Amino acid sequence: MDEPEAPPIDIKNEVDNDPCPPWEFLYTNLLVRGDGVPKAPEKSTLKGCSCIGGCPSDSDMCECAAKNMQLRSEVRTTTGFLYDSEGRLREFDHPIFECNDACACAEYCNNRVTQKGRRCALEIRKTEKRGWGVFAAEDIPSGTYLGVYSGELLTDEEAEVRGKTYNDYNRNYLFDVDFRYIKDYLATQRRKLKQRYTVDAMHVGCFTRFFNHSCDPNSMIVPCVFGDAYPEIPYLAFFTLDPITKGDEITFSYKGDTITNAQERQAKRARYKAKKLLGKKKTAKPGAFGKIDVPCECGSVLCEGSMWNLGSSDDEESGEEGEDSDRSM
Ligand SMILES: C[S@@+](CC[C@H](N)C(=O)[O-])C[C@H]1O[C@@H](n2cnc3c(N)ncnc32)[C@H](O)[C@@H]1O
C-alpha cells in the first residue's frame, strides 16, 4: 500500500538517551503472508461495482455501497458509505468495504480512503512509562484514517507459539483478526470460518506497532476489506475516534472494548470522575492465555489497571462486550 501523500514521521526522545526505538523490524505497510495463509486474492476473483465516476453513496445502486449496508442491522441513519465527503469515517461499528481494483469507478470515488494512505502528520516519541508511542504532530479531526496494522499474517496456531515467547520478553505485537462481523458476513455467502488469523508486527510492521494501549483510547481499529474474496482477512485500519490535538498521544484499546459512541464515552468519563475512581486500579491477574501481567500506565481516569483482557472483571462497569480480540492485543 503506497502512501504518496504521507508526511514523514519524526522520531523524538526527551526522556532518555536512546536515539530511536530498537529498529528490529522490516518497515512496510503490507501484510506478509506466513505458512498456511492463502495468497492475496487475484484481481480476477474480486467483485467490484460498475459505477461511472464517483460512486453515488446515497444509492444502493452501487454494489459496494450495498455491501457496506448489509451488516448494519439497525435503522439506517446514514447512506451507503461509511465515509463522509471528506473521507472521514462516521460509523465505527462496521467493517468497511472499500472500492477496489475490480471496480469501474474513478480514483476520486469517496469510497477509496485507506488505499490512498495516511495524510496526517505524526511523530514517534519516547514516553516515561510506556516505551515509545505515537503522537499527533498536528490537530487531527475524528474519523481520520491513520494507518494500517501491518506485519506478518499468521495462522492462529503459529501466533499461539510466538505469543508464549514474546510474553517472556514483556513485549507483544500480536493482534488477532477475529472480528465479530466475519462469521455473519461469511454466512451471507454460505461459507464457514475455517481458520483464524493473527497479525504479528514484531519483525515486520510500520509505525502503528508503536501505538500504546489506553483504557480511554482516542483511536480504534476498524476492519477494512477490498473486495470480498477473503473477508476473514481484512486490513486492520486505525481511525481517530475523537478530535486529537497536536501533541496528544494516539492510543487504542488492546482489549477491543472501545465505546464507539462519543456521547457514551463522555458520559462514562463523567461517571468515573464523579465516583473518584482515579487511582483505584484493579490488580492485574495472570492472563487466561498466559498474557503478560504488566500494569497499565495509560493514566486515564478510566484506567482499569491492565492492558489485556484478564478473565472475569470485578469492576462496577464490567459486562461491556469485547469487540475485537481477546487473545493478543
Ligand atoms: C505494541 S507495543 C507498543 C509500542 C511499545 N511502547 C514500544 O516501545 O515498542 C506494546 C507494548 O508497549 C507497552 N505498553 C503499551 N501500552 C502500555 C500501557 N498503557 N501501559 C504500560 N505499557 C504499555 C507494553 O510493554 C506492551 O507490551
Image (tube, helix red, strand yellow):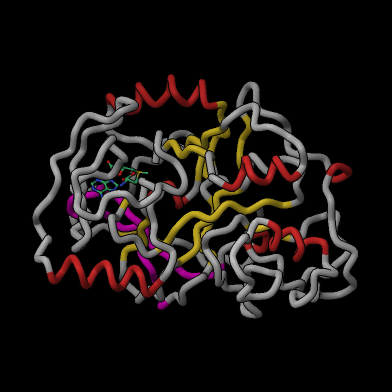
Q: Is residue 160 above or below residue 253?
A: above
Image quadrant for the C terminus? top left
Residue 16 visible (yes or no): no
What residue do we see at 32% from left, 63% from top? Answer: 249
Q: Residue 109, how many percent across, how many down?
A: 76, 72
* Frontmost residue, 313 versus 85: 313
Q: Is residue 67 above or below residue 88?
A: above
- Tell me the residue at 19%/63% (across/down): 301
Does residue 100 appear to the left or right of 76 in the view shown? right
- For the point 41% across and 36% down, the residue is 24
Q: Position of residue 130 (x, y in %)?
A: 24, 49
- Residue range in magenta is 119-139
Is residue 138 found inside the magenta-colored segment of the image? yes
Q: How many marks?
A: 0
Q: Give the image location of residue 89, x and y in percent.
A: 56, 69
Q: Is residue 220 visible?
A: yes
